[in-house]
Every structure is written in structure tokens, then in C-alpha cells.
């Protein structure tokens, strides 16, 4: 099922516990337990959940509550939760409310997750708040003021700048026992200056009933969301009128073109679109958003088609699409892509994406990782299949640490040879010597590294002195630790890492609070570590990397200069590649460089001379080496595989990024491209 078919309008309450990451490991679960009790005890939430009209999604330091039916449910629930949490000792919680488009997706473990503009905006609104604030997006505030019970409680908040330099207008709600009366520190007073909100021009063909009905609906809904909307309703043709129309189009941030079967032949609409296109080529804006009324893509022809053909398009088939259409347009306008240069400098596809790369796409775990690094948490675990971006996320954590003025050590276990991994003492001395060299730390290995103490104690003594040598924290990034799982001393090493975490409590005045260890791996640790209670893998904060959703693919497409020309094409590529980051970048790279056009890419995708041939041949080789893995892949092909068919092969293929679990308990390939290729080239055949 495509993301468009999964799209829904949700009324979202996003809440988190202020300062949660700074609480002790003992207090954190108790605090979360109290929050859960307050939420479950809220009458609005419990009643909606009972009838299937609400859904919770856990976050690292709070939760998201999605309501599917009642636009007032999030604010009523927020009030109930706020009052419940006033009971001593109070819990510092901030909340953000917004209504918008969301999508249901499965994560790597087969659990359902919710993504989309509705969640993103609610989170950004919440992020402006301090402890106790209940904040509303402009759209939510507009809707709530239509209700007598809420109208007197909604107050102006201010404006704030969020991600992508996005300026949001935020309101507050407060009353007896809930909310705060003071304006959040991150908000500025509302300013009516030009450009303070996105400017939108709506183009249409006058005199066409369907076009004008859609125009009126879009104008009303976009204004309600706080956007500045221009519509040309001039009737007197003159040079002054024409000049005004052109100026308004050129100064707009976004142009929405209502395209019906009748307006396809409109030369005036063609002229207006060409004006927008000319301005976009000069300055990078306005973005042009065509809305097709009951038109399939193959039916778009005539003068207007030449302009809108290469663009991302929005399809409206009837009144049932009203809310989805508005939510998609607002999402596109509120989160515009950065203006692109006339020439996009491409980067090689493959390997880690540099922290400052314009092609790095943030996912949900990026924000949580930033917070965890800034809080100096002890163990951060980055888990993901091959080519999912583990090293890239770790590199961003390292760069963030450097920007904070902290020390950073990097150990890539993939670079270690079999000889270096054969001896425990050689291994530990190599780790210590590498860190000492990177951090320019002088250590007397000859006299301090004493065989009588053994490798573990020698390593701990070295690290203690390294930490005590400077006041700044140390962030130690360990990449590809899977290679260490098979070493005879693996359990001892990971037990040592766990002991540094425990030492924060057992040795409160020691240096261990200055150490953060970031571990990137792909394989399930429980398959190799004998006692997880003596390892870092069940105490650290874990980040599971997932595929790109459709919205993130759109964002990446914009970074490449939009070589994917329509919403339908984006859906088709996403369905083919499943949002796998490497494959998505590869597809956009070959489209941008002209090595394949869209039709050719889809046609040749699974061929041995196609755009993904090297990658697919490597996949085929990796599943053909071991007979048991080959048998498992054949079971996936015929639909009979489950995780219990052969757990060793299952976890091996899961770590390599070739398969993923399904909610029905079976196993499928991570993307349909793998199924196509392995169907054409079954492993184990001569």
C-alpha cells in the first residue's frame, strides 16, 4: 500500500518531560510511569482509545497521542494530563498541538510508527515551550477559537523559527490548573512585517465552476493555517492589472495552480505559470504546486502540460481528498526545500555521508541523538542494517561533540586485522595507543601497562588517566563493532564498557561521567554475548535506523534538484526501493546525471546492466555463500519464511539489510527490487 493511501489527518498532542535525559537511571522509569498513569487516566484519551479513535506512540522522553476523530480531543486531553501532573511532586512537561497529515509505517522490527507533517509540526510547536506550556499551531488555534469553551482560553504566543528556517506562529492555552500565562522564552512577539509568513498565490481559470470551488476551499483553509494568500479576482483587463498579477506571482513563496480538464487549454494560466517558472529559475522560488482536479497524469496535455509536466503534482479526485490535499499542500509550503543552486554538486554515492553534506537527510533519531550527546549520556547504541547510515549518524554525533569543545576518539573495528584481533593484550594496547595518538595524550606504556594486571585492568587504568587529563568530556565512537562479536575476549571487552557505565553510580566522584561511548553495529548482540546483563547492549539508549519515508524521499529529491518529476513517480520509486537510503541516493544520482530517465530506471532496475547492478550482484553473492542462507532466501521467495525457520540465517540477513519482518509473522525482502532480482536470479542455481 502506498503512503498516499496510508495518509490520514490526525489531531496530534506531542508531549515530553523537560530535562528527562538529565534524570538518574533510577528516577527516569519512575517519572515515565507517572506520566503513563496520567495519560491512561485522562478521560478523553481513555474513551477515544477504547473506541479505536486514539493511538499512542512512544518517544525517548515523552509520547505522541494521535486522535483520529475529534479536533478538540488533544487540547482536552492536554488539560486533563496537566492537572493530573500537578500532584506533588509535579512532573515538568511541555505540550504541542497541531492537526495535519500523517502516515503509518513499519519500523525494522515490524512495529507500526507514525510520521508526517502532522507529527513534525506538533513537535516543533512543543519545542518552543518551557515546563508547563501548552502550545498550539496557528491552524489548531484557529479551529479551537470556533468553540465557545475554548475561545477565551486561547491567547497569542508569538513567532518562532524552527528547522529549515521555518517561521511558525504559535498560540498558548491556559486556565485553572493548566498551562502557563507567560510567553515561552524561545518565541518573539508577533510581527506583521512582510515575509513573516509564507506568501501563496493561487492560480486558476476564471468562470470554471470546479476551479473556482476548489479555489475558494483552498483559500479558506490556507488562510486558517496562517498563510498569506493572494488570489487574482480582477475583472478589468489593463496593463496595471497585468503588472500586479505578475508582481504577486514573482514575490510569492509558493504558487498553487488549480488544473482542471478545462483549464489545461487556458493561455492565461500558461502565462502565469511561465512567470512563476521564470522567477524560480532566477531565484529558486516560488515553488510551483499543481493540483490536478480529476485528471490522471496521462490526460494532462495542452499548453499548461509543458510547464507542470516535470513537477511534483497533487491529485484531487473528489471531496474525500479535501483534507488530504490541504494537509499535503501545507506540508510542502511550511517545509520548503532550500533554494537550489543552478548547478548541484553531486557527491559519490556509498559510504558515510559527511555531517555537513547537503544530501544528509535527518530522521527521527537524529534529534534524540543530539539531545543524548548534549546530555552526556554514558552509552549510545546505533543499530541498523548495512547501508542504513550508522556511520553517518555516528559522524554527526562526533561533529556535535567537537562543536561543543569536547574530545572525540574514533575506533573503526573494520580496520583491525585478524592478527590484531587474535591476542587480547595486543587488542587492548592497540585501542589505547590509537586513542592516545588521536588525542595527543602522552602515556608511559612501557612502565604503566603491566602484564600482571591483565588487559582489562590495564585498559581501565589508561582510560581513567585519559579522562582525568583534561576537564572536557570524551566521546568515544566505536564503529562496526560486529567484527568484535566473534573474538574470544568479546564478552570481557563489552563487560568492561558496561563497568564504565556502572562506575557513574558506584564511583560518583570518579571521571566516568565525562565518558560517552557511541557504539554502531548491525548484528543482534544477544546471538554472541553470553550475558547481556554484563554488556552495554541493555543499558544504553538505542537508536534504530529506518528507511526513508516518502516525505524524506521528497526532501532528498529537492536536494538533488528534483529529478523525480511528480508525486506519482516518487511513490513508484519509493515502492520499488522501500526508502533504502543508499538505493534512494543511487536512483536520484543516475536521474540527475541523465544516465537513466525515469521510465528507463524503472524498466532496467533489476537488470544486470541496470543502475543498481553492482549492488544487486553483491546481494546475490552474499546470499549464495552459505547453503543455509540460500535455503532461507528461497523460503522468503516462496512466502514460507519466518524468523523461526532458521534464526541464525534470519538475523544474518536482517543485519545485511536484505530482509525485514512483517506484522503477520512472516519475512519479506526489504524492498521489492530485491525480490525482483532474486526471482530472476534464484540463489543456489548454476
Image (cartoon, helix red, strand yellow):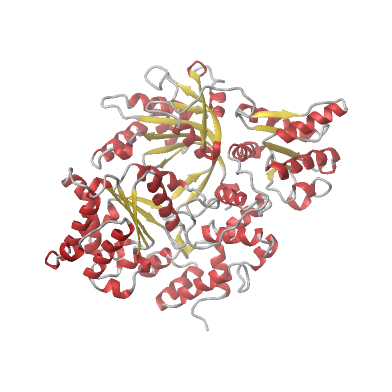
Q: Please tell me whether residue 134 is drawn above or below residue 378 in the rendered image.
A: above
Q: Position of residue 200 (x, y in %)?
A: 68, 33
Report whether 42 appears left or right of 285.
left
Q: Can the viewer see residue 436?
A: yes
Q: Residue furthest left?
A: 452
Q: 513 and 117: which one is in front?
A: 513
Residue 380: where, in percent of width, then height?
A: 33, 51
Q: Is residue 122 above or below residue 565?
A: above
Identify the residue at horizontal 25%, vertical 40% (top origin). Answer: 24
Q: Is residue 214 visible?
A: no
* Of 180 and 460, the residue lying toward us: 460
Q: Quadrant of residue 196?
A: top right
Task: Please state if 329 lies on the left or on the right of 16 as rendered.
Answer: right
* x 74%, y 29%: residue: 231
* Residue 483 x, y percent position in the rendering: 34, 67
- Above or below 621: residue 674: above
Indicate the position of residue 554 as horizontal and vertical percent values: 60, 49
Count every numbered label the image shows and give the total. 0
Task: Reply above or below: 227 against 366.
Answer: above
Left or right of 80 on screen, residue 253: right
Which is more toward the observer, 593 or 537?
593
Q: Determine which quarter of the picture holds residue 584.
A: bottom right
Amino acid at each position: 500500500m502506498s503512503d498516499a493511501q496510508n495518509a490520514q489527518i490526525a489531531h496530534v498532542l506531542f508531549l515530553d518531560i523537560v530535562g528527562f535525559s538529565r534524570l538518574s537511571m533510577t528516577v527516569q522509569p519512575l517519572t515515565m510511569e507517572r506520566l503513563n498513569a496520567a495519560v491512561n487516566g485522562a478521560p478523553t484519551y481513555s474513551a477515544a482509545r477504547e473506541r479505536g479513535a486514539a493511538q499512542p506512540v512512544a518517544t525517548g522522553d515523552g509520547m505522541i497521542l494521535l486522535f483520529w476523530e475529534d479536533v478538540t480531543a488533544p487540547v482536552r486531553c492536554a488539560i486533563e494530563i496537566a492537572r493530573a501532573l500537578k500532584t506533588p511532586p509535579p512532573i515538568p512537561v511541555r505540550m504541542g498541538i497541531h492537526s495535519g497529515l500523517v502516515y503509518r509505517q513499519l519500523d525494522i522490527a515490524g512495529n507500526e510508527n507514525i510520521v508526517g507533517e502532522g507529527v513534525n509540526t506538533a513537535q516543533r510547536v512543543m519545542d518552543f515551550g518551557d515546563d508547563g506550556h501548552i502550545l498550539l499551531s496557528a491552524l489548531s488555534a484557529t479551529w479551537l477559537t470556533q468553540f465557545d469553551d475554548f475561545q477565551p482560553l486561547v491567547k497569542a504566543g508569538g513567532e518562532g523559527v524552527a528547522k529549515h528556517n521555518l517561521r511558525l506562529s504559535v498560540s498558548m492555552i491556559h486556565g485553572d490548573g493548566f498551562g502557563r500565562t507567560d510567553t515561552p522564552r524561545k518565541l518573539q512577539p508577533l510581527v506583521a512585517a512582510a515575509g513573516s509568513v509564507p506568501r501563496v498565490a493561487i492560480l486558476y481559470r476564471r468562470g470554471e465552476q470546479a476551479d473556482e470551488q476548489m479555489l475558494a476551499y483552498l483559500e479558506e483553509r490556507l488562510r486558517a493555517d496562517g498563510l498569506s494568500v493572494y488570489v487574482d479576482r480582477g475583472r478589468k483587463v489593463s496593463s496595471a492589472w497585468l503588472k500586479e498579477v505578475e508582481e504577486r506571482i514573482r514575490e510569492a513563496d509558493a504558487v498553487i495552480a488549480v488544473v482542471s480538464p478545462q483549464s489545461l487549454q487556458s493561455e492565461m494560466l500558461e502565462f502565469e505559470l511561465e512567470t512563476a517558472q521564470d522567477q524560480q529559475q532566477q531565484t529558486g522560488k516560488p515553488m510551483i504546486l499543481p493540483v490536478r482536479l480529476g485528471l490522471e497524469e496521462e490526460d494532462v496535455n495542452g499548453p499548461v502540460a509543458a510547464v507542470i509536466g516535470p513537477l511534483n503534482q497533487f491529485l484531487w479526485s473528489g471531496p474525500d481528498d479535501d483534507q488530504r490535499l490541504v494537509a499535503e499542500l501545507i506540508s510542502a509550503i511550511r517545509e520548503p526545500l532550500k533554494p537550489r543552486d543552478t548547478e548541484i554538486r553531486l557527491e559519490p554515492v556509498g559510504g558515510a555521508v559527511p555531517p555537513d553534506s547537503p544530501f544528509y537527510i535527518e530522521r527521527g533519531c537524529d534529534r534524540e541523538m543530539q539531545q543524548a550527546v548534549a546530555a552526556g549520556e554514558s552509552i549510545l547504541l546505533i543499530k541498523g542494517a548495512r547501508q542504513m547510515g550508522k556511520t553517518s549518524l555516528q559522524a554527526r554525533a562526533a561533529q556535535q561533540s567537537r562543536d561543543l569543545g569536547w574530545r572525540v576518539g574514533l575506533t573503526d573495528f573494520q580496520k583491525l586485522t585478524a592478527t590484531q584481533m587474535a591476542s587480547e593484550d595486543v587488542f587492548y594496547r592497540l585501542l589505547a595507543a590509537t586513542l592516545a595518538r588521536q588525542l595527543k595524550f602522552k602515556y608511559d606504556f612501557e612502565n604503566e601497562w603491566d602484564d600482571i594486571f591483565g588487559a582489562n585492568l590495564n585498559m581501565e587504568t589508561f582510560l581513567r588517566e585519559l579522562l582525568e587529563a583534561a576537564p572536557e568530556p570524551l566521546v568515544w565512537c566505536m564503529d562496526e563493532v560486529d567484527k568484535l562479536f566473534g573474538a574470544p575476549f568479546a564478552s570481557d571487552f563489552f563487560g568492561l564498557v558496561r563497568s564504565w557505565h556502572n562506575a557513574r553510580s558506584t564511583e560518583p566522584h570518579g571521571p566516568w561521567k565525562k565518558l560517552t561511548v557511541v557504539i554502531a553495529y548491525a548484528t543482534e548482540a544477544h546471538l554472541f554475548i553470553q550475558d547481556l546483563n554484563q554488556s552495554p547492549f541493555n543499558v544504553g539508549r538505542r537508536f534504530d535506523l529506518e528507511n526513508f519515508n516518502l516525505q524524506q524521499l521528497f526532501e532528498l529529491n529537492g536536494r538533488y534538484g528534483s529529478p523525480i518529476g511528480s508525486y506519482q513517480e516518487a511513490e513508484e520509486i519509493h515502492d520499488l526501493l522501500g526508502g533504502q537510503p543508499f538505493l534512494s541516493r543511487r536512483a536520484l544520482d543516475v536521474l540527475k546525471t541523465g544516465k537513466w530517465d525515469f521510465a528507463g530506471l524503472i524498466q532496467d532496475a533489476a537488470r544486470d546492466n541496470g543502475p543498481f547492478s553492482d549492488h544487486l550482484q553483491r546481494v546475490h553473492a552474499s546470499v549464495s555463500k552459505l547453503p543455509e542462507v540460500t535455503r532461507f532466501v528461497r523460503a522468503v521467495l516462496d512466502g514460507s519464511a519466518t524468523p523461526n525457520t532458521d534464526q541464525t540465517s534470519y538475523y544474518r540477513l536482517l543485519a545485511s539489510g536484505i530482509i525485514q519482518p512483517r506484522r503477520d509473522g512472516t519475512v519479506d525482502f526489504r524492498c521489492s527490487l530485491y525480490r525482483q532480482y532474486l526471482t530472476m536470479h534464484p540463489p543456489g542455481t548454476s
